[in-house]
Image: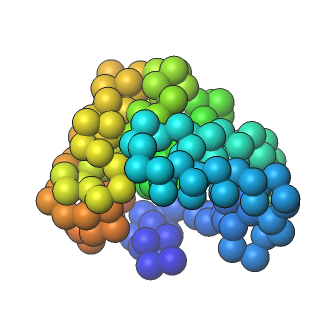
Amino acid sequence: MARARRFVTEGGFAVVALDAPHHGDRPRTEEFGRVVAELRAGMAAGGDDGAPLAAMHTFLAGQAVPEWQAVLTAVQELDLVGAGPVGYWGLSMGCGLGIPFVAAEPRVRAAVLGLLGAYRLTGTAARITVPVRFLLQWDDDMVPRDQGLALFDALGPVVKTLSAHPGKHGEVPESETDESLRFFTRHLGR
């Protein structure tokens, strides 16, 4: 929430933070349980082709994308917010769900994505047409570097930036919040 607070107070942006389907306090279905079991089994088997992770993201995105579009419509109908340009910020699973959302949602004008590999997302990533700032942890213990670089390469926009830092998956430096704020300010016209 600290990042969201900074985006509001320093950037003047309206911010919405949503739990992914089947996460947080949201109900979980048996189907989601099966998808998670397949993910865990795939990880335990030691394969790194990303197929189980891609299957989970595809399953979740099928629900998340239309939900997030409906939430965006409702928020933009608020007098306090209006129909201005939209940015999307999502790392790791937020990237796995964000790529299909950003590719499908024309109101999104800029996106910060990253900490994910190409796992079956290259076709969708190529359909993104807005500026993207892509974050990569050089020593990521969850996403192989070559997969992260492949996803960056697959992104469609001419205006895309790769920001790589040493460290593991969850060790994104705080300075990236500053850079994300500047990126959104530049591309969303604040």
Q: How many marks?
A: 0
Q: Residue at x 71, y 43 (%)?
A: 59
Q: Nearer the viewer, residue 148 or 158?
A: 148
| Position of residue 24 in the picture relative to residue 190 (left or right) | right
- Towards the viewer: 100 or 169: 169
Q: Nearer the viewer, residue 73 or 190?
A: 73
Vertical comparison of 103 with 76: above or below: above
Residue 69 showing in the rendered view? no
Q: Nearer the viewer, residue 33 or 179?
A: 33
Quarter residue 167 falls in: bottom left
Seen at 84% across and 60% down, the residue is 29
Seen in the picture, residue 153 relative to 114 is either above or below; the reply is: above
Give coordinates of residue 175: x percent, y percent: 23, 66
Quarter-of-image position of residue 58: top right
Q: Residue at x 58, y 30 (%)?
A: 103
At x 53% / y 49%, what residue is drawn?
42
The image position of residue 172, as x and y in percent, is: 28, 65
**Can you give x and y, in whole percent of width and height, for residue 130 in the image?**
46, 30
Which of the 4 image quarters holds residue 23? bottom right
Residue 76 coordinates in the image, percent (x, y): 73, 51
Question: Seen in the image, is 177 located left or right of residue 85?
Answer: left
Looking at this rendering, what residue extends furthest in the front direction? 45
Q: Is residue 3 left or right of residue 86?
A: left
70 lies left or right of 60: right
Instruction: Examine the rendering and report whether any part of residue 23 can be seen.
Output: yes
